[in-house]
Image (tube, grey):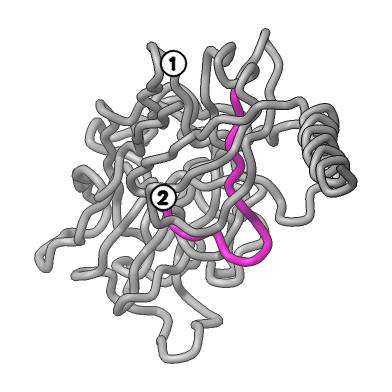
Amino acid sequence: MMIRKVILAVIALGFLTVSCSDDDNPVKTSRLTLNLDGLEALGTDYVYEGWIIVDGSPVSTGTFSSVSFPQIFTVDSEQLEKATTFVLSIEPAVDPDPAPAATKVLAGDFSGDEANVNSNGIVGDFSTSSGKYILATPTDTDDTNEESGVWFLDNSSGSPVAGLNLPALSAGWKYEGWVVFDGTPITTGTFTAVNAADDNAATSMFKGDANNGPAYPGEDYLQNALAGLTFPTDLKGKTIVVSVEPDPDNSPAPFTLKPLAHMVPADAMTHTAIMMGDGPVKSLAGVVSR
């Protein structure tokens, strides 16, 4: 009889333990799977963070720094079922703000259990982007080094106009021009408007001392060359790139979105508009499954 009472007591305790466990952890969870293409690692100071939009409000699904996919996250089942949209943002690794940052890189609405996400609507649609540039060095008075500067303008009509045809960017993003010197990209400056001087027009360490240049994005590489380079130089054979950068920027290197690029022809003429081509990455995409 005593043995039977002990067994019954143990069984009762087991039921009690399970019941308490269920009461202490009432939230049911489900898996959210990310399969994303084209993302690059952000470095140590920034991370990617996923969000589901539930009743119009963002709910974090977790942060990550690895760009190997698929990746699986555990999310509140009820919230995940009610979610209408998935958004991916770029956040500081140490983030005092629980809300999503302005820099959102992917988004898409759920249709059933999947959301096809892309960068076109949330960053900008670069499918029809185009550009022109000229080789010139307007920031000094020396006319013998004109192949050492690049300016994103079109002077084909005789008067300069904007050389870049790019969409206005969403908040949290800026454009940046680059020249690739033997595999090393060096900035021409960041900008948001194609018909105005870029952000470093008055502070560039590379420009000449005569003036800040025309009211368009661009750069003269005339002085203060980085290690291994000599300025003035010849940009023929170098690659000109326009990228789309997070703001604030996660890295001094170009971000993965590069809608325009062009290798300067060996026979390029200075002060003559040159057409750019498509860059290597014009959009990012992926599938999010619940």
* Quadrant in the picture for residue 15: top right
Measured Cα–Cα span from mark 1 to mark 2: 21 Å
Q: Amino acid at mark 2?
A: Leu
Q: Are there few (<14), some (14-19), or many (20+) residues within 10 Å of tag 2?
A: some
201 w.r.t. 98: above or below: below
Horizontal arrangement in the rendering, residue 5 relative to residue 235 (left or right): right
For the residues bearing labels 1 and 2, Cβ distance under 8 angstroms: no
Give me the residue at 45% from left, 65% from top.
Answer: 220
Horizontal arrangement in the rendering, residue 274 relative to residue 188 (left or right): left
Taking the magenta stretch, the answer to whether it contains residue 78 is: no
Give me the residue at 55% from left, 82% from top.
Answer: 224
Number of dots carrying numbers: 2
What residue would you read off at disc 1? 110
Give me the residue at 67% from left, 8% from top.
Answer: 55
* Quadrant in the picture for residue 57: top right
Taking the magenta stretch, the answer to whether it contains residue 48 is: yes
Q: Residue furthest top?
A: 55
Label 1 SS: strand
Label 2 SS: loop
**Marks 1 and 2: which is nearer the front?**
1
The region drawn magenta spans 39-52
185 w.r.t. 105: above or below: below
31 w.r.t. 178: above or below: above
Sequence-first disc among 1 and 2:
2
Pinpoint residue 34: horizontal percent, then vertical percent. Answer: 43, 39
What residue would you read off at disc 2? 39
Q: Amino acid at mark 1?
A: Phe
Q: Are there few (<14), some (14-19), or many (20+) residues within 10 Å of tag 1?
A: many
Pinpoint residue 115: horizontal percent, then vertical percent. Answer: 40, 22
Pinpoint residue 95: horizontal percent, then vertical percent. Answer: 79, 48
